[in-house]
Image (cartoon, helix red, strand yellow):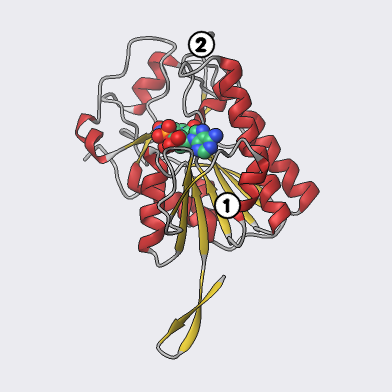
Amino acid sequence: MKPRPSGGAFECVMKIVVTGAKGTIGQAVARYAAAQGVQVLAVDNVGRGDGEGGYLAADLTDLGQCCEVLHGADAVINLAAVSAALLYPGAQTLMTNVAITYNVCMAAVLVGVPRVVWASSVQVFHSYPTVRRAQYRYFPVDEEHPNDPQNEYALSKVLGEQIAEYFARQHRLTAVSLRLPEVVPPEMWADLPRPIEPWEHSPLPHYVHLEDCARACFLAATVSLPPATHHVVLITAEDTSADIPTRELIQRYYPEAEVRAALPDFASLLSGKRAEVLLGFRAAHRCHA
Ligand SMILES: NC(=O)c1ccc[n+]([C@@H]2O[C@H](COP(=O)([O-])OP(=O)(O)OC[C@H]3O[C@@H](n4cnc5c(N)ncnc54)[C@H](O)[C@@H]3O)[C@@H](O)[C@H]2O)c1
């Protein structure tokens, strides 16, 4: 924490590095964190820095650059990544994402940043696009549900979670892997709820509003957590983005799955319990009245 003069005294200001800060989620997280009074260093590999220390251009596949941008921070929220399948060849997506996740964790250890938060994805158990139909054992899906990565993007998230676990055990890092669903920005909010695609390979209609997502990332970086622990946490709105009730949706697409909770009306198919208990996070936005 950096001391900052405040009315004659000094108060400590937390410093958070937000990577992928030119991206959809990174911009919202950097804005939200700054509004909470935190000192933010925004980092991305787009363009060049602002020359004032607020934005730095860096390629996070390079460990040396990672170390330099993380120096002096209290936490890093790592949102830099190839953010979907089919944007680049699979190998490029996998190598880039694994390199960034590893480098951010290693740099945090090397320069003494105690907390790493990063964006995993619900695609660990339901990739998009998929090859096979996703198999759900039970609903609501929680963090213990088996994974089934079906492309290199999803595989990079599974491996990223293992990297975070490794650093918590081997290097006493405190890490949070946030499994994000579709993150819906305000300009797309009016499209929800929407018809569920009549295609067995389409993703589950899970989502979270961008503002809720930014708050979840900030909470994951700032709430008190035991040192040297790694937490996988699902983030979700409390409802689905589908225009059919949840029970009907399960019956139509996943009749073989065990239903472990009431799931009335349009209740989410994902469990937000761990996010609530661990981070104190509940989504404020829902698309159904
Ligand atoms: N948007 C979603 O719906 C969603 C859902 C689940 C998970 N996620 C994950 O959240 C994270 C952020 O997603 P987003 O939607 O904001 O993606 P985005 O593509 O808008 O932003 C990603 C940013 O990372 C930067 N980046 C890529 N490679 C880099 C490198 N080598 N060094 C530095 N910066 C680099 C890009 O320039 C980009 O600005 C990603 O990890 C993504 O996989 C997103």
Q: Position of residue 82 (x, y in %)?
A: 50, 28
What kind of element bears circle 2?
loop
**Label 2 environment density (alpha carbons within 10 Å; few <14, some 14–19, many ≥20):** some
Position of residue 242 relative to residue 215, above or below, is above
**Label 1 environment density (alpha carbons within 10 Å; few <14, some 14–19, many ≥20):** many
Within the image, what quadrant is residue 200 found in? Answer: top left
What kind of element bears circle 1?
helix
Q: The residue under label 2 is which amino acid type?
A: Arg
| Observer able to see residue 140 | no
Q: Which mark is on residue 133?
A: 2
Position of residue 56 relative to residue 148, above or below, is below
**The C terminus: image quadrant:** top left
Q: The residue under label 1 is which amino acid type?
A: Val
Q: Position of residue 39 (x, y in %)?
A: 46, 64
- Point out the frontmost of discs 1 and 2: 1
Compared across the picture, whether 251 is left or right of 159 comes to left
Which residue is disc 1 drawn over? 69
Residue, x 44% and y 91% (percent of image)? 8
Q: Position of residue 16 (x, y in %)?
A: 51, 58
Position of residue 231 relative to residue 192, above or below, is below
| Observer able to see residue 134 | yes
